[in-house]
Image (cartoon, rainbow, N blue to C red):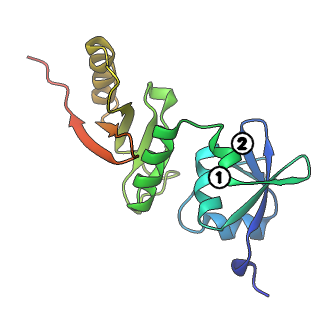
Amino acid sequence: MRLRSKSVKAILSGECLIVRGNREINVLRGKRKIGTIKNGVLELSPLEGIYLMKKGKIKAFHMGKEINVDQLLQKVDFKRYHVFEDLTEKGYLVKSGHKYGADFRVYEKGDDPDKEHSSYLVRVIGEVESVKAYDLLALARVAHSVRKKLILAIVGEEGEVTYYSVKWTKL
């Protein structure tokens, strides 16, 4: 039996899912560079874990018991997951953007995060949420200073996502 035909075991540990074993890690990562390798194990964010669970690529366990997608979905923001899934399905590589004050940093299709910089910073906003102009301007300025495009991802009540580009202009 080939490893690709079955799900890889992932253990929920704190805020991430841990995958051990070089073969298992290579099967999951492939060319996508999903997750982060630390100390010989693959750490997946809850968003990455949910996505891989929905695709049948991993089975998640906590304290020896298998957990399902719905249990893991309780740990994440609905809007953020929909944007993560949408961008990933479109072929982008999505990583945390907290370092820049955004929800995500996004790499162009095919880019290697070990060799290239991300192209976009994405801020997720609910369709009925308000955003302070000051916060938006601050994020636009950060994106401009690190040479990334700022994208606002507006998530509707049903999970539909609309993207808007924001550009910093100094007059």
Tags 1 and 2 touching, CB below 8 Å: yes
Left or right: residue 60 versus residue 140 is right
Relative image position of residue 101 (x, y in whole percent) = 44, 24
Inspect the image, locate mark 2, and give the three-letter code of the amino acid beneath it.
Cys
* Most distant residue in the right direction: 64
Image: 37 above or below 26: above
**Left or right: 112 as drawn, with respect to 52:** left
Q: Could you tell me which residue is drawn at 48 percent across and 57 percent down?
A: 112
Task: Describe the element under mark 2 as helix, strand or loop.
Answer: strand
SS category of the residue bearing label 1: helix
- The answer to whether residue 43 is seen in the rendering is yes
Residue at x 71%, y 63% (from the top left corner): 58
Task: Kindly identify which residue carries mark 1.
Answer: 49
Q: Is residue 159 left or right of residue 70?
A: left
Front-most of residues 162 and 114: 162
Place residue 144 in its image quadrant.
top left
- Can you say whether 92 is above or below 149 in the image? below
Q: Which mark is residue 16?
A: 2
**Number of callouts in the render?**
2
**Residue 33: x, y in percent?**
56, 58
* Residue with the most extreme left position: 171
Identify the residue shown where x is 43% and y is 29%.
102
Crowding at label 1, few (<14), some or many (≥20) Cα neighbours within 10 Å? Answer: many
Which is more toward the observer, 7 or 29? 7
Q: Nearer the viewer, residue 81 or 113?
A: 81
Checking the image for residue 115, the label placed there is none
Q: Amino acid at mark 1?
A: Gly
Q: Residue 66 falls in which quadrant of the image?
A: bottom right
- Residue 122 drawn at (x, y percent): 37, 37
User: Between disc 1 and disc 2, whose residue precedes?
Assistant: 2
61 up-or-down from 74: above or below: below
